[in-house]
Image: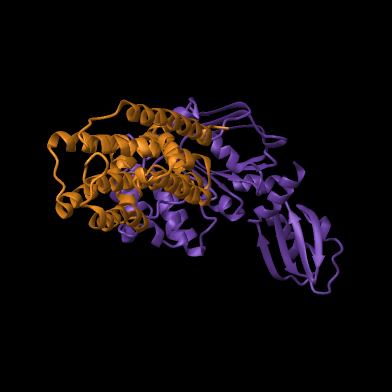
Chain colours: A orange, B purple
Amino acid sequence: MLFYAKTEAMRMLRNRRYIIFVVVFPVVLYLINANIYGKQTDGAGVRYSVVLMVSMAAYGALASSMMSSAVPWATERQSGWLRQLQITPLPNWMIIATKLGTAMLLVLPSLLLVAVVGVVQQGVSMPVGQWVPLMLAMWLGTIPFIALGLAIGSLLTADAAQPASMICMFVLAIAGGLWFPPEVFGETMRTVANVMPSYHYASLGWSIVAGHGVELTDVLVVAGWAVVLGGAAAYLYRRATVRA
Amino acid sequence: MNAIVFDQVSKRYGDVLAVDDLSLAIEPGKTVALLGPNGAGKSTSINMLLGLLRPSSGTVTIHGRSPEHAVRAGELGAMLQNGALIPELSVKELIDLVRRLYPDPLPLEEILKLADLSELVKRRANKLSGGQTQRVRFALAIAGAPKILLLDEPTAAMDVESRLRFWASMHDYAAGGRTVLFATHYLEEADEHSDRVIVIARGRLAADGTAAEIKAGVGGQVVRFTLGDQPAAGLDRLPGVTAVEVAAGTATLHTSDPDATVAALYRGTELDIRGIQLAGADLEDAFLALTRES
């Protein structure tokens, strides 16, 4: 099972498209934006270099969550690889659990890379008491997105899962305020952002770097979405693998 | 105990009865061909053996227990139709991944040798040819050292040479006292590579026995020779002959006793017999006859 997870992770890291979208893109976007706006501060007096680090780490983690789950999963289901695994002694629930675990593992490179660039290139500095909760929140907060990806992968064919996961990812990223600070949005968009799991996910990070600790609302919304999307993923997985 | 038992198994998809009251038992250590035309219910039967499908009625057992149990215990290995590999992984990584899921797998080296993959260990799955992919899929099927190996039309995408290599690998694996059940619609494969042939058509058991028994059961063998413009009269009265066909100067005698027929042709007729052929191995006739009847 551990070997399965390791192999799965290795396989995604060899996927060029994955590396570009998930690892390179957020870093480049961060470098560009931080070098333009980095020295300004937001309403709470936090430098944008820090805010953007959180936003881009959140975007990278979100992209990774979706990309390492939806399309690979749909493809394996369709191509017969899932059946190949189903006829081994590996229990069904472990297949999907490994997928979840591996996807969480694969979130780490984009999170860490953006953080490292933030520290090295933008001189971001925070006490350890902020770094640790920040990374932990940004990491565990990806569960709803991975669940969404797996739900898409169980529901759709690989061809349909590709655009569906991309659309979900961009909607979550933009409407959640990961690309543009939510403050620049109008009233309507702020309302939309407020129900997005991605907004509350990034907000976990923004609150931590602002020194406010963690907002209960953010935790509840992210956890709520994790339960809803996790339930959907589990249901759709059962439906996709059920013995007719 | 039997390796595989189907007890009055039926499988219905909506209005279609894919498998219809199938009962059969396969002893351990045998290599058995499941022969039938497309749509006969071969894949459905194999998927039921693997617990991927549930019978609508009846029971399938493996070593006396449910297919799910056999899968969990690592007793089954299978090469299904259209199973893709993970493109980013190498041959060795794929095999290692699957073998480690089994409690008592074959050593990696042995798998590579059996599947004839030693040269390709580092090759990524997306760089393999069709025949090589099939060999990897065979390797995945035997990786866990399953006691029962199920192959669903394993040679469908292979060229002649790949086929020969494949069957050699299959026999090597079966030689360890393992049970092999392979589905095919190639008659020669069933004839050459199995101890026993189970013929199914429209989901029903049409015949069951050795290839020779099945051929004998449907009017036996064929004696063919160049008749030219000589008269065909009296050929149907030769010993063993069940039917006579004459076409384009060639006489074809269906016979249940080719030795007696040939002897009588030479000794009991005035004909000038040239170009004589004994076409015994025509399982195709038997197969067509069987699948038409049922």
Residue at image point 61% right, 51% down: B185
Q: Measured along the vertical axis of the image, is residue A243 above or below residue B207?
A: above
**Left of B110 or right of it: where is A243?**
right
Residue at image point 84% right, 74% down: B229
**Left of A92 or right of it: where is B154?**
right
Q: Measured along the vertical axis of the image, is residue B27 above or below residue A26?
A: above
The quarter holding residue A228 reads top left
**Left of B256 or right of it: where is B80?**
left
In the image, A129 versus A5, the foreground residue is: A129
Residue B18 picture location, percent across and down: 67, 38
Q: Is residue A101 visible?
A: no
Q: Measured along the vertical axis of the image, is residue B233 above or below residue A216?
A: below
The quarter holding residue A100 reads top left
**Left of B139 or right of it: where is B21?**
right
Residue B192 picture location, percent across and down: 54, 53
Residue A69 picture location, percent across and down: 40, 44
Q: Is residue A190 visible?
A: yes
Quadrant where the C terminus of chain B lies? top right
Residue at image point 55% right, 30% down: B5
In the image, A35 versus B192, the foreground residue is: A35
Residue A150 picture location, percent across and down: 44, 39
Q: How many marks?
A: 0
View extreme (bottom): residue: B229
In the image, B40 versus B275, the foreground residue is: B40
Residue at image point 54% right, 32% down: A243
